[in-house]
Image (cartoon, rainbow, N blue to C red):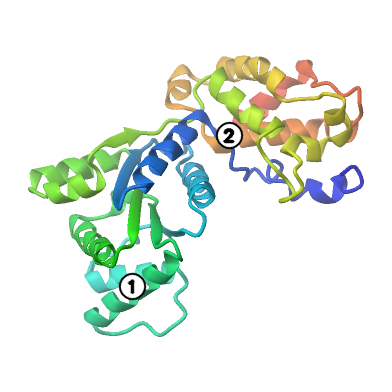
């Protein structure tokens, strides 16, 4: 790994700020999804403030269900703004989301059949499908009704379907509108309980992330090397770990971040930015005696939080 370190540095998930790390809220969300995923027809919904890290959480959920249910399928869907909403347009968007290679039928019946067959194939040998919906607050009542019909057709042919909705705070308003218009069937199907998702809100949340960097991550794939070992193989072999730095890191974050924003939760992308800056700061010093430079933590955090 020492010989490969430099060639792996730029593409390392931490340095690209794209690492999917298991925050405590994300782990909780993934556990809830696994519980719903065991059902023949499961559904769960989350709302979060902007920039808290909805997409990162959905990626973690996707990785978790693929590991827990090998052979299942995942469909990632995001509503498209369309003033002329129609069932056919929704069906076409589903097909495009899975890179459907064949010509899409013109008739509504044809599109329904294509979507049913395509999702059956996507569900794989387990006949188990997870549908992950980002920006779910953009769905209309009509679209949810059509989407419910898509799921019902799959259930009838014994495909297990779990739907995960993730949206902003407006998702609460959508739920209320559905109740006001008497669409309790859609509330029951998709948003029976609406969970709030928050970002990293304290040192304990940060410690879970750092522990993942130290032990519960891997890069390159199949190497068995945690993230920190790949970045600093000599220092890691001598005992360097990120977790002991958590208290100092969070102390600086708490000093520089408004209380209201801390309570809302720190977005995963901001945590990733801080960690990437820290790694780059000590990049040239991989050795057995490497220690985290405590005197430099404050300016690293300050630069990373600018614009957060």
Q: Is residue 305 left or right of residue 171?
A: right
How many marks on residues? 2
| Residue at the spot of label 1 | 115
- Residue 85 lies, in percent from the top left, at 23, 66
- Residue 228 lies, in percent from the top left, at 76, 35
Q: Earlier in the sequence, mark 1 or mark 2?
A: 1
Q: Give me the disc on residue 244.
A: none
Front in this rendered view, residue 257 or 233: 233
Q: Is residue 82 left or right of residue 305?
A: left
Q: Is residue 154 above or below residue 262?
A: below
Considering the image in quadrants, where does the N terminus appear?
top right
| Residue at the spot of label 2 | 270
Where disc 2 sits, the SS reads helix
Q: Is residue 110 above or below residue 216?
A: below
- At 77% from the left edge and 16% from the top edge, which residue is drawn? 294
Query: How much space separates mark 1 and mark 2, taking CA atoms?
Result: 38 Å
Answer whether residue 166 is visible to the viewer in this image. Answer: no
- Residue 238 lies, in percent from the top left, at 87, 25
């Amino acid at each position: 790994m020492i010989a490969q370190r430099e060639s792996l540095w730029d593409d390392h998930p931490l340095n690209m700020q794209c690492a999917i790390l298991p925050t405590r809220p994300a782990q909780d969300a993934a556990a809830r999804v696994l519980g719903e995923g065991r059902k023949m027809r499961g559904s769960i919904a989350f709302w979060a403030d902007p920039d808290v890290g909805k997409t990162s959480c959905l990626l973690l959920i996707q990785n978790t269900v693929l590991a827990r249910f090998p052979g299942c399928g995942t469909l990632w869907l995001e509503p498209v703004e369309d003033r002329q909403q129609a069932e056919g347009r929704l069906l076409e968007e589903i097909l495009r989301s899975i890179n459907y290679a064949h010509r899409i039928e013109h008739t509504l019946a044809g599109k329904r059949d294509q979507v049913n067959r395509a999702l059956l194939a996507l569900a794989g040998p387990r006949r188990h499908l997870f549908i992950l919906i980002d920006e779910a607050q953009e769905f209309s009542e009509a679209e949810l009704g059509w989407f419910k019909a898509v799921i019902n057709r799959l259930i009838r042919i014994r495909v297990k379907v779990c739907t995960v909705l993730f949206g902003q705070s407006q998702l609460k308003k959508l739920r209320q509108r559905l109740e006001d218009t008497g669409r309790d069937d859609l509330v029951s199907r998709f948003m029976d309980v609406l969970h709030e998702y928050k970002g990293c809100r304290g040192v304990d949340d940060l410690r879970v992330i750092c522990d993942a960097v130290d032990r519960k991550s891997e890069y390159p794939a199949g190497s068995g090397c945690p993230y920190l070992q790949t970045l600093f193989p000599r220092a890691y072999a001598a005992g360097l770990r990120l977790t002991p730095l958590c208290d100092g890191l969070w102390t600086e974050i708490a000093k520089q971040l408004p209380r209201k924003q801390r309570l809302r939760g720190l977005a995963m992308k901001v945590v990733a930015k801080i960690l990437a800056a820290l790694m780059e700061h000590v990049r040239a010093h991989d050795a057995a005696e490497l220690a985290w430079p405590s005197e430099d933590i404050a300016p690293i955090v300050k630069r990373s939080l600018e614009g957060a």
